[in-house]
Structures are given as C-alpha cells and as structure tokens.
Image (cartoon, grey):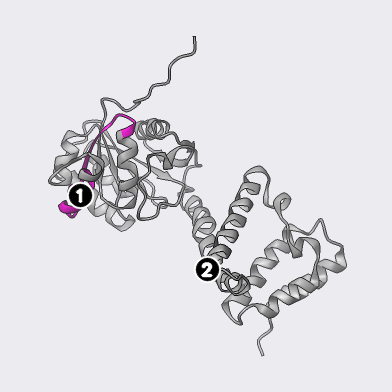
Amino acid sequence: MKARKNLFPLRGDVVALLGAGGLARALAPALLAAGARVVIAARRPAAARALAKKVRAEAAPDAAAALEQATLAILCVPDDALAPLARELARHSRGRGRSVLHASGFQDARPLAALARAGWNPGWMHPLLPLPRDASAVKRFEGAWFATGGSARARRAARRLVRALGGRELALHAGTKADYHLAATLVSNGSLALFELARAHFERAALDPRMARAAFAELLGATAANLARANPREALTGPIARGDLESVRGHLARTRPGLERELYRTLGRVLLDLSRTRLAPAQRRSLAALLARPRNR
C-alpha cells in the first residue's frame, strides 16, 4: 500500500517570523498550511499584529518574545538590518541548539555571527522567485527553488522547511552566494529592465497597449520555458541567430540613442557569440561590425 503523504509536515513546530514585509506575508500562510504554529514580530508591532490577524497567526510584542517560543526562527528583514538585529537578539535570547535562518539572497551566515555565539545554528533559505508586495498565496512556493546553506543543523532545518512548503532545494558551492544572487538579479530584475525599455516600442506598435503587454509577457514566459528545456545556445532564435543584417540595421535605427542603443549592441554581441556556429564567417563579420561600440569622435 502506498504511504500516505503527511499533510501537515510542520505540525509541532513553532516558527518565529521576524518581519512583516512581502516575504513574511507569503511565508506565514504557507507555514500555517503545513501545520506550523507561526509567531510574528516586527519593528513596528502594529504591522506584526495586522499580518497575524490577516493570516490567523500569533503576534508577539517583540522579537525576543517571538524567539522564546520558537523551535525555528526566520529573519525576513532587509540585508543591512540582519547583523544589527542579530546582535540585538543575541543579547536577549539563547539559541539552545535551535536554528535561525535569514532569507537574503546575497548574504551568507556571517551577519548572524552574534546569534551563533549565543548558541543558535545560523543559515539561510532564499526563495528563487519574485515576490511582489501583495504576495500571500499558499501555493506560491509549490515547485519553487530555494537556495539553502549555513551550519549542518541549519541546512537540515532549511531543507525540511523547503520540502514542507512544496519547494525544491538548490545546492550551492561554498563561497558562491554572491554569484548565485548576481545570476538571479540579472535574470529576474534584468528581464524587468529589458521589458520596460521594450515597452514603448510594443505599445507604439499595438492598437491596444494592454493586450500588447500581455502578449509580450507571454513571449517572455515562452522563452523561459525554452530555457528550462535547453541551454541558451540551443534555445536562441531571432535575427542575429539567422544572420539577418537588414533586421539588425532596422532595430538599431529604431532604438533611442544612448542607453537603449548601446544595450542593444551589448546584448547583440553576446547573442552573436552564442550564434557563432550557425553563421558563415562573412555573416559574423558583418554583424560584428554593426554591433561594435562606436568609436569616440
């Protein structure tokens, strides 16, 4: 007989969420749905009470009180607040072998050094997905990737949380957290920047700007789906991959001088390198000339 799936894998856990921003608003209902008891504290107690009331969790008067009850703590605060918060908490809370995780994509366990000295097992659990300010859906984490790390016990705690949330763990080489976060920023936030630069062009071309935005968002999603199945060289399409000089000339003529045009050239040079095995030498030379940085006059 097939084993029955544990519907409440965090039953018996008390998770202290420190912070009431977007990540805490997304994590709280997901943790509750997994069976955990959730205690929320924030720099502004009113924000903690409001979130706790909304998701039917508990609010603590301060962070130290939340930690006193917790079997596990998650710090959902900005990067520059991590070390000061850890120092403050270490003055009032002994870890007694418990784990404390932060959710920063860039920082490793070093900002939590004060808590480590106070007996906590420090680590991190960073969800690799965009969380807008209104994030609250429990299913948001199902299938999501999480980068985890820290002490051995903290990694085990993070891995258990990821599984309970329906996510997948992304293991990193030691000392590469900054590379991981740079990659995530280029892909996620970089895509938003490109979309914004492209917006004026697709809204100018389409009769209905809202439909244009939806259509180009679908294109971005289809590109991401292609990348999930193949590497960039195999997934590449478009005029540079085809050696279409006329289209590239036309694009350059339509780009706004300055940032947009230089960005098109810079990205084009990367795409040309990806396309080098598809193109004849003469095509590569002509495209390279079009995409070269203009000489200073």
Choose the circle earlier in sequence order: 1 or 2.
Answer: 1
Residue on which disc 1 sits: 50
The furthest residue to the front = 207
- What residue appears at the point 33 percent right and 42 percent down from the top-left corner? 27
Does residue 180 appear left or right of residue 111 in this picture?
right
Q: Residues within 10 Å of mark 1 (few under 14, many from 20)?
A: some
Query: 39 left or right of 200?
Result: left
Region in magenta: 33-52
Check disc 1 and give the amino acid type: Ala
Which image quarter holds the C terminus?
bottom right
- Which of the 4 quarters of the picture holds residue 271? bottom right
Marks 1/2: CA–CA distance: 34 Å
Query: Is residue 101 at least partly visible in the picture?
Result: no
Q: Residue drawn at (80%, 62%), measured in percent from left and top?
A: 242
Give how far across and how far down residue 13 sits, in percent: 26, 29
> For the residue labelled by badge 2, is the local secondary structure a helix, a strand or a loop?
helix
Callout 2 crowding tier (Cα within 10 Å): few <14, some 14–19, many ≥20: few
Q: Residue at x 35, y 26 (%)?
A: 9
